[in-house]
Amino acid sequence: MELQNGILRAQLARKTGCNLETIRYYEKVGLLPEPPRSSNGYRVYSPELVQRLQFVLRARELGFLLEEIKALLGLDAVKPNACNDAHGIAKANLAAVRSKLSDLKKMEAILASAVAGCESRDFGGCPILNALSGSSPTSQAARR
């Protein structure tokens, strides 16, 4: 049901692939403006909001925090400092992503070692449970 120059939340969700509750949450935290209501009480979203929500979803996929997305949404692409501001936000996010990748590589090494130990059955006890409890040499080395 299209409403005069607007769409309902379910349509916005379908057009963007976003969950209904997520749309509600993004309104609550200020990433999306609260939409006006129709005479029958339905929230009516402007068609332009599809693009804004897609921007938010893509930014979340890339690991940007909600506050960073708010800042990015507040930038005007034609203003001279907008690109510098966006660059600073993206550079900080890139550093965070690289840090997470480093942590994931460490996690992978610990899990791979525990799984290999379990598969070879050359152990005293369960390598997976030992790694989780911190009693295996692999888990202790990873914490250093």
Image (cartoon, rainbow, N blue to C red):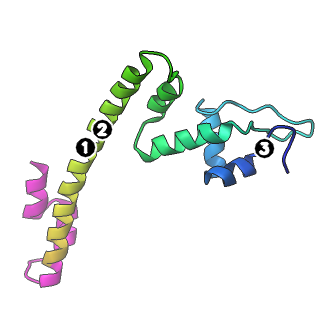
Q: Nearer the viewer, residue 77 or 74?
A: 77
Residue under label 3:
7
Q: State the CA–CA distance, disc 3 to disc 2.
A: 35 Å
CB atoms at circles 3 and 2 under 8 Å apart? no
Q: Amino acid at mark 2?
A: Leu
Q: Nearer the viewer, residue 64 or 79?
A: 79
Residue 61, position as x, y percentages in the image: 45, 47
Residue at point 83%, 34% (across, down): 37
Q: State the CA–CA distance, disc 2 to disc 1.
A: 6 Å
Residue under label 1:
98
Image vertical order of residue 64 relative to residue 144, above or below: above
CB atoms at circles 2 and 1 under 8 Å apart? yes
Residue 41, position as x, y percentages in the image: 87, 39
Q: Amino acid at mark 1?
A: Arg
Q: Which mark is residue 94?
A: 2
Residue 16, position as x, y percentages in the image: 62, 50
The segment highlighted magenta reads 118-144
Q: Residue furthest right?
A: 39
Residue at point 87%, 38% (across, down): 4
The kind of secondary structure element at disc 2 is: helix
The kind of secondary structure element at disc 1 is: helix
Q: State the CA–CA distance, disc 1 to disc 3.
A: 39 Å
Tell whether 132 sits left or right of 60: left
Q: Earlier in the sequence, mark 1 or mark 3?
A: 3
